[in-house]
Image: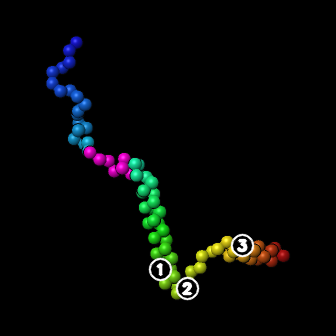
Amino acid sequence: MEPLPGDHGAHGTFDKRASASCPAFWAVKHRSALGTVADGVLAVAFTAALNARARRSDQQIRLLTPLHFRELVKTAARMRDRKER
């Protein structure tokens, strides 16, 4: 048995489609950085949406702190108790 004459290495129709880089592979290798960038973009978009809402309604938007949340839950419970009576 003897090899066929000529270069019969790992070549074929794939050579025409092959490229030196792959965006999907780059994204997998830089997943942490992409996540950080995505978090930043979402934070900026959320802040811009809150500012736009505040400008439209001419009201100050107040964040719901744990104290406000507790008061809200207590008020909801009182209203539910009144309804049940």
Residue reaching furthest to the left: 6
Task: Judge the density around disc 2: few (<14), some (14-19), many (≥20) Cα neighbours within 10 Å.
Answer: few
> Image quarter for residue 34?
bottom left
Residue reaching furthest to the top: 1
Q: Find numbered disc 2 in the image and state the secondary structure of the residue it sits on.
A: loop
Residue at x 36%, y 50% (from the top left corner): 26
User: What separation in Å lies between label 1 and label 3 (alpha carbons)?
Assistant: 28 Å
Coordinates of residue 67 in the picture (x, y in percent): 69, 74
Q: State yes or no: residue 24 in magenta.
A: yes
Task: Judge the density around disc 1: few (<14), some (14-19), many (≥20) Cα neighbours within 10 Å.
Answer: few
Residue at x 84%, y 76% (from the top left corner): 85
Q: Find numbered disc 1 in the image and state the secondary structure of the residue it sits on.
A: helix
The label on residue 59 is: 2
User: What separation in Å lies between label 2 and label 1 (alpha carbons)?
Assistant: 11 Å
User: What separation in Å lies between label 3 and label 2 (alpha carbons)?
Assistant: 23 Å
Q: Which residues are magenta?
A: 20-27
Taking depth in this image into account, of 29 and 83 the one nearest to the observer is 29
* Residue 32 appearing in the image: yes
Coordinates of residue 62 in the picture (x, y in percent): 59, 79
The label on residue 52 is: 1
> Image quarter for residue 8?
top left
Q: Is residue 56 left or right of residue 23?
A: right
Q: State yes or no: residue 4 in magenta.
A: no
- Give the mark nearest the N terminus, 2 or 1: 1
- Magenta span: chief secondary structure: helix
Coordinates of residue 73 in the picture (x, y in percent): 72, 72
> Could you tell me the amino acid type at mark 3?
Arg
Which residue is the site of mark 3?
Answer: 70
Residue reaching furthest to the right: 85
Coordinates of residue 68 in the picture (x, y in percent): 68, 76
> Could you tell me the amino acid type at mark 2?
Gln
- Give the mark nearest the N terminus, 3 or 2: 2
